[in-house]
Structures are given as C-alpha cells and as structure tokens.
Amino acid sequence: MSRSSKLRDFVVAFTRLIEREPQEADALAAGRGLLLDLVREDDWLPEAYAQPHPQFYQQYLLHADPLERLSIVSFVWGPGQRTPVHDHTVWGLVGVLRGAELSESYTPRAEGGFEVGPTERIEAGEVVAVSPRIGDIHAIANAYDDRPSISIHVYGGNIGAIRRSVFDPATGARKPFVSGYANAAVPNLWDRSKE
C-alpha cells in the first residue's frame, strides 16, 4: 500500500462513517478503530505535514470534508512545546503517530477557575477522545524536550474555522479564538500516479 493510499483510505472510511450520521458515542467508538489503524504505522505522513516550527506547534490540514462534517489534521510539536488551556466545542479523536504527548484535563468549578485533572501520557499508537459531552477542556504538551512529536486529529467539524476558546486556568476567564491552519495547501490524496 502506498503512502498516499493509507491516508486516502482513512479519509474514505471516515467519510463513510460520518455519512451514516452516527450518534457521537458511535462515531467516537468506530472512528477510534479507524484512527488506531492509521497511527499504528508511521510510514505515510508526507514530510511537508510533519515539520516543526522553532516556536509554535503546527496544525496542518490534511483533509476537510466539503460539508464541514469532518477535518483531519496533523499536529506537530517541537521539543517542549505546549498549548494553552483550550476547548474544541465538537467531538475529536487524537492519535499519536510519533513521540508522545501529555494531556492535562480541566473541569470548570462553580466558583471560577478549574479543577485540574491528572496528566495522561499518550504514546505513539494510542488514541484518546475529547468532546463537550465527555470532557473538552485540556492542555497538551510534547512529552519530549529534545525531539518533535506528531499526532493525527480528527474532528466533527472544520476545526480550523470553528470559534473556540482559550482559558486562564486560575480564573476561568475565556478568550475566543479561531485556530486556522499552518498550511495553505493540502495533500493531493487522489493522485494515483505514484502508486
């Protein structure tokens, strides 16, 4: 199987899943299996979508469903890079392809601020889920200070265009943002000339 066909087959399978209009729990369960199969082998991601930035983590768009039901991105973490505390507002799956990530969950407190959950280490080949229903606020960091880590994210919407929030972990103060993408072009999944 060629490098591009692995990603293409994943996009097709996930699109077929979404076309069935599953409940969120079913989409996460079935989608988890698809993403586990994709991140099991680190031999398919084009180098252009695996490049770290010296200061900022990178979010590269790999595929966006034209009806915005689905987006697939590669997150590339330089050594020691981390996100602020943030939410997603839609369901999502995160599969670590290379390296490892640290995920710290945050639960809003009635009196303000957050209850900080335990830090979960996610190793290459593992998949975790987020959503407003099961826990949507977290901060993510590269587990390594000396090398990049890469994860593949699948969201139930066009995550680069969704209005989301970052939070002050002490006060719970919310600041809106739209993440966008680090790349202007996406991989041509449909080019079969190299197969």
Image (cartoon, rainbow, N blue to C red):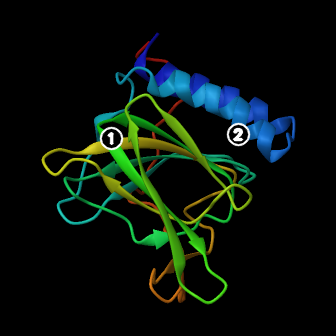
At 62% from the left and 26% from the top, the residue drawn is: 34
Q: Inspect this view and state whether residue 190 appears.
A: no
Residue 79 pos. (x, y %): 19, 53
Residue 115's place in the image compared with 48, above or below, is below
At 63% from the left and 32% from the top, the residue drawn is: 32
Q: In this orientation, which residue lies closer to the viewer: 15 or 88?
A: 88
Q: In this orientation, which residue lies closer to the viewer: 19 or 165?
A: 165
State which quarter of the image contains the C terminus. Answer: top left
Left or right: residue 65 versus residue 26 is left
Residue 58, quarter of picture: bottom left
Residue 52 pos. (x, y %): 24, 51
Q: Residues within 10 Å of mark 1 (few under 14, many from 20)?
A: many
Residue 155 pos. (x, y %): 63, 50
Q: Which residue is mark 2?
A: 28
Q: Which residue is mark 1?
A: 100
Q: Residues within 10 Å of mark 2 (few under 14, many from 20)?
A: many
Left or right: residue 97 versus residue 21 is left
